[in-house]
Amino acid sequence: MRRQTLNLRTTPDHSLSFNSRKSVFISRMEITRKEGECQKMYGLLFLSIEHFVNREYGGAIWKKILLHANLDEGTAFTTHAMYDNELMVKLAQGCSEVIQDKSPEGYMCYFGKCFFKFCSTYKYDQILMLSGRYFRDFLHEINNLHETIRFGYPKMMSPTFMVKSEDVNGCILCYISRRCGFVEYVIGQLQECAKMFSVELDAKVLSIKDTDNGCQIEYRLNFDNSPFLNQQIAPLEDSTFPDIPSTLFFEVFPMSLFFDKDLKIRQVGKNLQFLFGEKPLKGKKMTSIFTLRRPLSVKFTYDDISHYNRVVFELQFCVLSKVPQENSDPVQMILRGQMEKLPSNEMIAFLCVPLIENVEDLEMKGLYLNDLSMTDNSRDMILVGHQHAPNMELALDKIAQKVNETKIVQRKAEEYQQASRDLLYSVIPKTIGRQLENGENPAKTWKIIDGVTLMFCSITRYSRFVDISKANSTRDFMKNICEIFEWLDKIIEEHKIFKVETKENDGLLLLATGLDGELNHPNEAAKCALELIQSCEKYSRKVLGKEISLEIGMDYGSVVSGVVGLKNYQYCLFGDTVNTASRMDYHSLPGRIQLTQQCRKQLCDIDFVICPRGVREIKGKGMMPTYWLAGIRGDKTTEENRILYEKEFIQDGMTMEKFKLAELKEEEIIKQQKLKAAATETVS
């Protein structure tokens, strides 16, 4: 079924809008996802993309592209690891969305060029240069080059290329693959390769067709193909050149065969016949004995095969094992060679050799060295391989050991990277930490954050612990200080509260929630404050042997946040909310948590019991209504605190009527402050 016919040059087609090209590309991506779910490709292809994107656009851009492709920003590709085909398409989309200078299709073409240039570091360019004198020779040899590379990459699913026709201005190239969505990627590879032969290549897509195993694409390649005329085969001048007898032919090619247009075997080499015993091959149909293994997606018909005269063919069949065994299962054999069409009698000669791994494989398949041709190196390869087998096994063991060591090193590197990232996120919020990792200037991290819960926590009479003159030794002094703050950090970490600052000399901590847009963060901050207060008695008596109590103040509102400095980053918060939370802590009492009216509104009455303290004189703020956080509703200690706080409220001569009036006044002040701030922001 014909999917679509395109006339896309490698230069952008301005007649199509960006959104149109993007929609076509996404449809191809869907095809890739459906048809290639179980297909994978080697990491070498992704390493080439990573290398050139990092070099041309920078590491920060590459990390954004990885995140767009649903990968961790620290993802590192490895050469022989296998990755989903779809990932290549996702990276192309990511590049297009992040960099915004090319369409996804344009980036697929760019990826193809990157891969070809990157492969020069592996010396593959030398192999390509030796494939032929001209670019046309390279096009005819692509499949054979893939066969060479498969020894190093055994899981590679290489496509098939076929030159269907040629002229002095170029050729029509057919690309057959199990992968879909790589139309432009192939163009990029071909264009970069053409430069190696000093050829300018212009490529057009003539057609894209679905096949049972993937897709088939026809390209029109326009380039200077004048060598095509020079390499036309001239007729032999000597008309008396003798005919070659079939007996002589099959002595030179003892494993070959001939078949006609109906795929019936007309003649077969005696050594190939030995494999089948007394069952004659002559007269049998090729499809009843052999399976066409390569090229991919080529139909096993006379017409299709006749087009692939310069492509390596592989035919697979089974023979009985010649080594006696209890369970004698059939042994698979592969014949590899060239299909050559004989125009005089409409037959095709399959000039082939069997693929033999070693001496044991030769014996199992019932072959002898004498069965193999003397005109190729089949015999030498088996003998040399047998001699070097122990060395090869040792080398493979060493390679396997190196691979394991590399994996361990890579895993440790990832662990160290994660540890350094965790350390950064412990002193700077994640959103800002990622900005700095992407190379942004610290000045760009400054912003106003609305709806932040701030909590100041101070240790009552902290000077008792930091008087070094009363300590037995410097070691004991430091031990006490570290134990106190490790205890506090443990509780803070359990509630996922961000510690903005620690002042060890004053025994003061500034904690914040809501900096990264967390949900329900005021309630979590309140729970953390209550646990800090409640754990004081248990911890101080059991661990330090001294009485410790905390005073906590909390507020809710807007802050200005950002990183100060280019080295030794310091994350800072500024604003009225910071000052007010500090005053709440300063005017609090040991073992208590004082709240502002703004913070009290954010806490859930179902979860917490909150009691009015009264109207207090707060430095820099005037008279303010404040509250005590008694505890979590239903707790015994909470009820005791509630009774105590209500009693103190009455003893201070405060009535609920006066307190309500103070609340209304405070609300009006807060409203005026917000209006003033909004007007200032509009003017700026």
Image: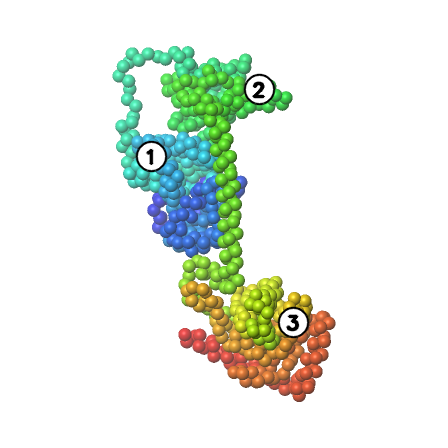
Above/below status of 402 relative to 327: below
| Crowd tier of the residue under label 1, counting other residues whose Cα lies within 10 Å: few below 14, some 14–19, many 20 or above | some
The residue beneath circle 1 is: 129
- Hey, what amino acid is under mark 1? Met
| Crowd tier of the residue under label 2, counting other residues whose Cα lies within 10 Å: few below 14, some 14–19, many 20 or above | few
Mark closer to the chain start, 2 or 3: 2
- Hey, what amino acid is under mark 3? Lys
Residue 253 place in picture, x, y as percent: 42, 17
Q: Is residue 161 visible?
A: yes
Residue 244 place in picture, x, y as percent: 36, 13
The residue beneath circle 2 is: 323
The residue beneath circle 3 is: 546
Above/below status of 419 relative to 502: above
The quadrant holding residue 659 is: bottom right
- Hey, what amino acid is under mark 2? Val
Q: Nearer the viewer, mark 2 or mark 3?
A: 3
Q: Nearer the viewer, mark 1 or mark 3?
A: 3
Above/below status of 467 relative to 78: below
